[in-house]
Image (cartoon, rainbow, N blue to C red):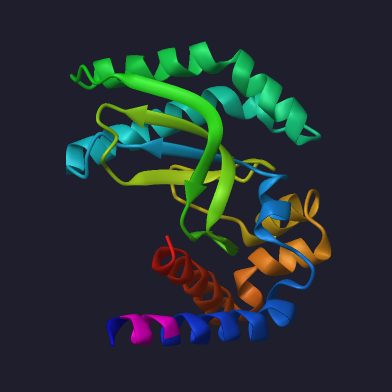
């Protein structure tokens, strides 16, 4: 009986996704979008308030350093090259901030392909899937993460106030994404439809994993 219910749910999910895919994403796919972005994630040691605060301090220091080097990049290859070249310096900055705040947490940094759930940043909602990401993992790395998009440069807003400029975000994303790809991630078009669609895909993946 349980298997029958799960199968029925799966069928409903498939039908729902099929009915919505044309109107929501056109000819775009998650892999198309992922191939044009580099995400940035800073993962805290834990969800403790102090650890989360340290995470944000690391974020601020790293973005202050790397922002001038990345904001003029014309393509993803240039951004990737800079991140690889500056990896040791970024790691050192993170270690300095952690030490300055009285901790001895380890720091690991990497530019790698990682699986991510649905995430929203301002007016952009990225679907679940694998993305290239520059990650800074503090200590055990079991806490909530802060994230943005490094290429195109969406991180470089007023991070002290958490101000995300929708117009700037749209402009930057449209420099690298096609119209169909942008429609797929633009949650101002029909945010409920987009988020529900992505969540259904997540549930489908979990059912058959």
Residue in the image at 57% along x and 61% along y: 127
Q: Which SS does the magenta portion mostly show?
A: helix
**Quick check: 100 above or below 70?**
above
Picture coordinates of residue 8 (x, y %)?
43, 87
Q: Is residue 4 magenta?
A: yes
Q: Quadrant of the C terminus?
A: bottom left
Residue in the image at 44% along x and 26% along y: 61
Picture coordinates of residue 168 (x, y %)?
69, 54
Residue in the image at 56% along x and 77% along y: 191
Image side of residue 142 versus residue 179, left or right: left
**Quick check: 114 above or below 73?**
below
Q: Is residue 131 magenta?
A: no
Q: Does residue 206 show up?
A: yes
Image side of residue 29 versus residue 120, left or right: right
Image side of residue 142 versus residue 9, left or right: left
Picture coordinates of residue 194 (x, y %)?
58, 75
Picture coordinates of residue 72 (x, y %)?
75, 31
Residue 59, by quadrant, is top left
Residue 97, by quadrant, is top left
Image side of residue 74 versus residue 31, left or right: right
Q: Which residue range is magenta in the image?
A: 3-7
Residue in the image at 69% along x and 33% along y: 71
Residue 83, by quadrant, is top right
Q: Quadrant of the N terminus?
A: bottom left
Q: Does residue 155 show up?
A: no
């Amino acid at each position: 009986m349980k298997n029958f219910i799960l199968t029925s749910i799966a069928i409903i999910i498939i039908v729902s996704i099929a009915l919505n895919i044309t109107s929501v994403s056109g000819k775009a796919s998650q892999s198309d979008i992922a191939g044009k972005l580099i995400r940035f994630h800073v993962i805290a040691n834990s969800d403790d308030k102090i650890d989360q605060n340290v995470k944000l301090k690391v974020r601020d220091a790293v973005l202050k350093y790397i922002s001038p080097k990345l904001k003029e990049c014309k393509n993803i290859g240039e951004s990737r090259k800079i991140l690889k070249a500056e990896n040791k310096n970024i790691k050192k900055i993170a270690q300095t901030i952690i030490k300055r705040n009285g901790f001895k947490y380890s720091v690991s940094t990497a530019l790698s392909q990682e699986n991510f759930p649905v995430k929203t940043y301002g007016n952009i909602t990225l679907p679940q899937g694998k993305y290239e990401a520059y990650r800074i993992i503090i200590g055990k790395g079991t806490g909530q993460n802060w994230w943005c998009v490094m290429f195109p440069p969406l991180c470089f807003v007023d991070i002290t106030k958490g101000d995300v400029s929708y117009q700037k975000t749209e402009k930057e994303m449209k420099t690298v994404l096609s119209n169909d790809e942008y429609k797929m991630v633009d949650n101002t078009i029909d945010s409920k439809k987009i988020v529900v669609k992505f969540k259904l895909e997540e549930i489908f993946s979990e059912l058959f994993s």
